[in-house]
């Protein structure tokens, strides 16, 4: 998605440790007009799929997922980061290792909001090693819901999450794939460029 790539080039900041900072338009301050174009593009890429729900993970996936959902006319469910797991069986849960915070935490979704009748599109801001997505996929599997696809805004193609997910045969659409970035020069190289 050209508009997104141009915005990453203009406002993205490459940090040491393979972190791309996009907090001026994507995951802290949010450019809703850009989100709207992102929603339109995901709708185009997943056209014809029967989607009943969008699943994302707090916090930075929520804003994007809400705008995307306006194109699909379905509810958004977000996986919550939990302090302690509720073991009374009311929630689906999974463990996720955070790439940015380097810690493991539990995420939960209430059983009331996912069922075997659901056809789910997962939306998130970044794909790096794929831990977040693996956790969400595990939750969908526990719920017996069908994963219709995954929409990612920025995939870091030099980390192996994308390859893992594609090998599983899941329809993964990333709007910008970064194949290399350099913290010293601040440059970003996109796939197919
Ligand atoms: P993964 O679980 O695929 O390794 O990482 C995905 C999550 O880590 C995303 O939801 C995102 O919050 C965060 N993340 C991974 N890489 C980056 C990055 O380069 N920049 C930012 N801002 N977040 C990242």
Image (spheres, rainbow, N blue to C red):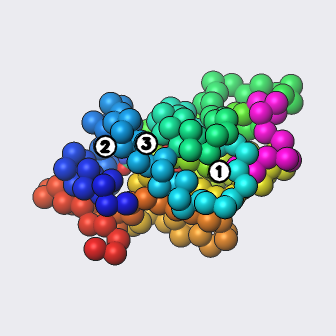
Q: Position of residue 44 (x, y in %)?
A: 53, 59
Q: Which mark is residue 36?
A: 3
Q: Secondary structure at mark 3?
A: helix
How crowded is the residue under tag 3: few (<14 C-alpha within 10 Å), some, or many (20+)? some
Q: Earlier in the sequence, mark 2 or mark 1?
A: 2
- The residue drawn where x is 39% and y is 63% is 177
- Residue marked by disc 2: 22
The N terminus lies in quadrant:
bottom left
Q: Secondary structure at mark 2?
A: loop
Q: Earlier in the sequence, mark 2 or mark 3?
A: 2
The C terminus lies in quadrant:
bottom left
Left or right: 64 in relation to 55: left
**Which image quarter: residue 70?**
top right
Using the image, determine if residue 111 lies above or below residue 177.
Answer: above
**Which image quarter: residue 6?**
bottom left
C-alpha gap between disc 2 and disc 3: 17 Å
Q: Which mark is residue 73?
A: none
Using the image, determine if residue 75 lies above or below residue 175.
Answer: above
Label 2 C-beta lies within 8 Å of the nearest ligand 1 atom? yes
Q: Position of residue 57 (x, y in %)?
A: 58, 38
Magenta highlight range:
110-120
Left or right: 182 in relation to 171: left
- Residue marked by disc 1: 121
């Amino acid at each position: 998605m050209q508009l997104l790539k141009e915005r990453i080039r203009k406002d993205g900041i490459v940090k040491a440790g393979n972190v791309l900072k996009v907090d001026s338009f994507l995951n802290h301050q949010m450019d809703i007009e850009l989100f709207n174009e992102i929603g339109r593009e995901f709708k185009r890429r997943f056209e014809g799929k029967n989607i009943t729900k969008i699943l994302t993970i707090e916090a930075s996936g929520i804003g994007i997922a809400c705008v995307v959902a306006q194109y699909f006319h379905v509810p958004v469910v977000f996986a919550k980061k939990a302090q302690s797991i509720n073991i009374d069986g009311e929630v689906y849960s999974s463990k996720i290792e955070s790439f940015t915070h380097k810690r493991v935490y539990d995420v939960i979704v209430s059983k009331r909001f996912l069922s075997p009748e659901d056809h789910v599109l997962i939306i998130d801001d970044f794909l790096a090693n794929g831990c977040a997505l693996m956790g969400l996929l595990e939750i969908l599997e526990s719920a017996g819901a069908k994963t219709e696809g995954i929409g990612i805004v920025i995939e870091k193609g030099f980390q192996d999450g994308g390859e893992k997910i594609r090998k599983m045969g899941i329809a993964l659409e990333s709007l910008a794939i970064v194949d290399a970035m350099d913290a010293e020069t601040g440059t970003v190289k996109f796939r197919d460029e």
